[in-house]
């Protein structure tokens, strides 16, 4: 009893996903959107990759880096692609219009359309024995057809031949549209894998003659496989690879198990016999009959749908499912094992004392005896790196070396393997925090208060160091509108001093920085100096000035309103505090204290108001109060008292 193959369900699932190619990692990708994969073929002479878009009836060409270079439409329902043996023609199976189409791979111009008289297919194609072979039919009456490109349709002879599956020794024939594969190293042979049932029929046909003949046939339920989803003819030996995993040998008309690779879903076999196997989200490269991959790629986040080798073996092309569809990726250096290299150095060490660095190099392909690794030390004295003696790898892949770091700080040890005919290059490093001595650094004027606009000299003093005697001085005025600025950098003098001048218009944090050298740690010190604001008050509307005792007063008539105009260093949002006191029986008493805003010109005019009686003595002053006058960029500053007298 035969059951329907799950391959049909998988094909429906995959065809519902859109393919968009993007650039990532070692694989370059095209930017063309593909509704559902419809075949993958690679031309070595043109260095092009051809991808079919079944949903949108399109074929596009990409270069070996995956960048799109051309496309063609009007190929409805394209399901598979194949190149002729000489690479001069690209063939596409169009199950949508029931045709085999021949295209020029250099231009993607359609050369010839070959109608196929079937209601189902063609689905899968291959090129062998000078002909295009295709499978067609539904689940119950699958068969094999061919196109002879040497026959001119205009001649009256149909180049398309149907019902080419041999009847002798094939039992009930094929259930469904079979998978097909050929190999240039096995000319005239065609591998066939049945997709229409769960047991999986296998065949190898000799198509070198006028009609196909059976070389080997298998139709024993579940003896070799539980369904065929991928079939590859193995070059250099009488084997087929099924589902990217099982190696089945054929001889004397039958198949027998010949071994297996670790479980996969599909594969393509390269010219040297290397296997590119898809397994979930990974592509693994195996040498013939090996059980450990040469290398493994993880080209994306989703399953890999299909793979194809470049005929020169330089790379493998993969269709990878992402959240936004499929992408075409070029996986480079597939024949080289990718080593894993570790470097382990102490986290900390003492300068000028010996330390030991250890590590290990491993790969899926063993290294030759005596393999050496290069070592470079990078530190403050050798910022471009200093080569150390090469280290030889032991038989178990481990290595170690000793070194005495002459410089302190971050010391990095980089170990490299240059690569060889079987391995890619690899590099790894580790960093040691090597001790450094401390030095002294001081900066004067911390906490001092200066008048507005004073030019203040800040002097930094540097203690003992190794090579560097450079110090940088920065000024950071208070306020968000001005940032930290380098005002001086240079070498200290013979006394260890370096100075810089600061215009003290605001409270200012001054920082001296020694960047450190290979034997002394960096050092930073800070001094915060403070600056007053500049305040002056002009008195107007008085009729004279005269002394009362030893104090000069501005004299006003009792009915006159004094006008007091204060000028203060401006800052956005700043206010002056107006203090007013009145003299009574030998003492001054506070009459009012109120804040008034400054204009953008720094001025604030206050009209005091006439008292209406004589003999009154008053005084006023303007004050900037840090934090209360609207900002905190200067230190609290008191203006001088202005004395007022009211007469008749």
Image: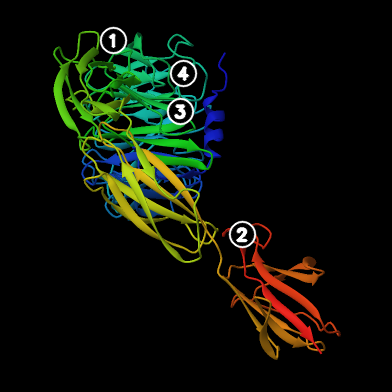
* Mark 4 or mark 3: whose residue is earlier in sequence: 4
Mark 4 or 3: in front is 3
Say if 163 sits above or below 604 in the image: above
Residue situated furthest front in the rendering: 549
Name the one closer to the observer, 394 or 575: 575
Q: Residue 496, image x and y in percent?
A: 27, 44
Q: Residue 20, image x and y in percent?
A: 47, 45
Image marks 3 and 1: residues in contact by CB distance under 8 Å: no
Say if 358 sits above or below 494 in the image: above
Q: At numbered mark 1, what does the secondary structure look like: helix, strand or loop?
A: loop
Mark 4 or 1: in front is 4
On the question of residue 21 being in view, the answer is no
Q: Which residue is mark 4?
A: 200
Q: Quadrant of the C terminus?
A: bottom right
Q: Residue 549, image x and y in percent?
A: 68, 76
**Tally of numbered tags:** 4
Image marks 4 and 2: residues in contact by CB distance under 8 Å: no
Mark 4 or 2: in front is 2
Name the one closer to the observer, 503 or 477: 503
Residue 249, quarter of picture: top left
Q: Which residue is mark 3?
A: 281
* Mark 4 or mark 2: whose residue is earlier in sequence: 4
Q: Which residue is mark 1?
A: 252
Q: Which residue is mark 2?
A: 636
Disc 2 crowd, CA 10 A, few/some/many (<14, 14-19, 20+): some
Image marks 2 and 1: residues in contact by CB distance under 8 Å: no
* Mark 4 or mark 1: whose residue is earlier in sequence: 4
Disc 4 crowd, CA 10 A, few/some/many (<14, 14-19, 20+): many
């Amino acid at each position: 009893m035969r059951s329907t193959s799950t391959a049909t369900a998988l094909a429906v699932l995959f065809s519902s996903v859109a393919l968009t190619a993007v650039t990532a990692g070692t694989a370059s990708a095209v930017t063309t959107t593909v509704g559902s994969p419809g075949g993958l073929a690679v031309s070595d002479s043109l260095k092009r990759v051809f991808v079919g878009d079944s949903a949108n009836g399109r074929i596009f060409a990409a270069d070996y880096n995956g960048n799109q270079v051309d496309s063609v439409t009007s190929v409805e329902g394209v399901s598979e692609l194949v190149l002729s043996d000489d690479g001069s023609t690209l063939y596409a199976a169009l199950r949508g219009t029931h045709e085999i189409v021949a295209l020029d791979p250099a231009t993607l111009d359609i050369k010839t359309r070959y109608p196929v008289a079937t209601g189902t297919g063609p689905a899968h194609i291959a090129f062998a024995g000078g002909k295009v072979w295709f499978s067609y039919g539904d689940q119950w009456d699958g068969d094999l057809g061919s196109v002879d490109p040497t026959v001119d349709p205009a001649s009256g002879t149909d180049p398309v031949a149907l019902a080419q599956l041999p009847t002798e020794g094939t039992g009930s024939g094929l259930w469904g549209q079979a998978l097909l594969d050929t190999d240039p190293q096995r000319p005239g042979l065609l591998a066939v894998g049945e997709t229409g049932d769960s047991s999986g029929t296998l065949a190898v046909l000799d198509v070198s003659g006028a009609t196909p003949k059976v070389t080997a046939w298998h139709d024993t339920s579940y003896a070799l496989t539980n369904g065929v989803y991928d079939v590859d003819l193995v070059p250099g030996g009488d084997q087929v690879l099924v589902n990217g995993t099982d190696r089945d040998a054929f001889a004397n008309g039958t198949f027998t198990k010949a071994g297996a690779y670790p479980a996969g879903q599909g594969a393509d076999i390269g010219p040297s016999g290397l296997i590119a196997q898809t397994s979930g989200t990974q592509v693994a490269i195996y040498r013939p009959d090996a059980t450990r991959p040469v290398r493994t790629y993880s080209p994306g986040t989703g399953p890999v749908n299909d793979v194809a080798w470049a005929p020169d073996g330089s790379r493998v092309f993969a269709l990878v499912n992402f959240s936004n569809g499929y992408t075409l990726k070029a996986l480079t250096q597939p024949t080289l094992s990718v080593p894993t290299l570790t470097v382990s150095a102490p986290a900390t060490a003492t300068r000028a004392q010996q330390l030991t660095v250890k590590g290990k190099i491993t790969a899926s392909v063993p290294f030759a005896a005596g393999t050496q690794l290069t070592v470079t030390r990078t530190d403050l004295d050798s910022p471009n790196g200093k080569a150390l003696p090469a280290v030889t790898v032991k038989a178990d892949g481990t290595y170690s070396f000793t070194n005495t770091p002459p410089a302190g700080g971050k010391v990095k040890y980089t170990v490299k393997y240059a690569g060889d005919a079987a391995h890619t290059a690899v590099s790894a490093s580790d960093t040691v925090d090597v001790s450094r001595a401390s030095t002294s650094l001081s900066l004067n004027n911390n906490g001092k208060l200066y008048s507005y606009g004073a030019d203040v000299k800040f002097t930094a003093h540097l203690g003992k160091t190794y090579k560097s005697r450079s110090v940088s001085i920065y000024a950071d005025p208070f306020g968000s509108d001005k940032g930290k600025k380098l005002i001086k950098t240079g070498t200290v003098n013979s006394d260890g001093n370096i100075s810089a001048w600061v215009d003290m218009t605001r409270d200012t944090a001054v920082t001296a920085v020694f960047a450190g050298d290979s034997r002394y740690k960096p050092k930073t010190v800070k001094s915060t100096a403070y600056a007053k604001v500049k305040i002056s008050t002009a008195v107007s509307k008085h009729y004279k000035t005269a002394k009362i005792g030893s104090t000069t007063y501005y004299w006003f008539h009792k009915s006159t309103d004094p006008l007091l105009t204060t000028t203060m260093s401006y800052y956005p949002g700043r206010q002056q505090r107006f203090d007013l006191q009145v003299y009574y029986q030998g003492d001054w008493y506070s009459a009012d204290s109120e804040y008034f805003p400054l204009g953008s010109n720094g001025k604030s005019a206050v009209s005091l108001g006439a008292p209406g009686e004589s003999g009154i003595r008053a005084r006023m002053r303007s004050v900037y109060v840090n934090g209360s006058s609207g900002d905190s960029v200067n230190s609290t500053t008191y203006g001088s008292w202005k004395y007022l007298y009211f007469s008749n």
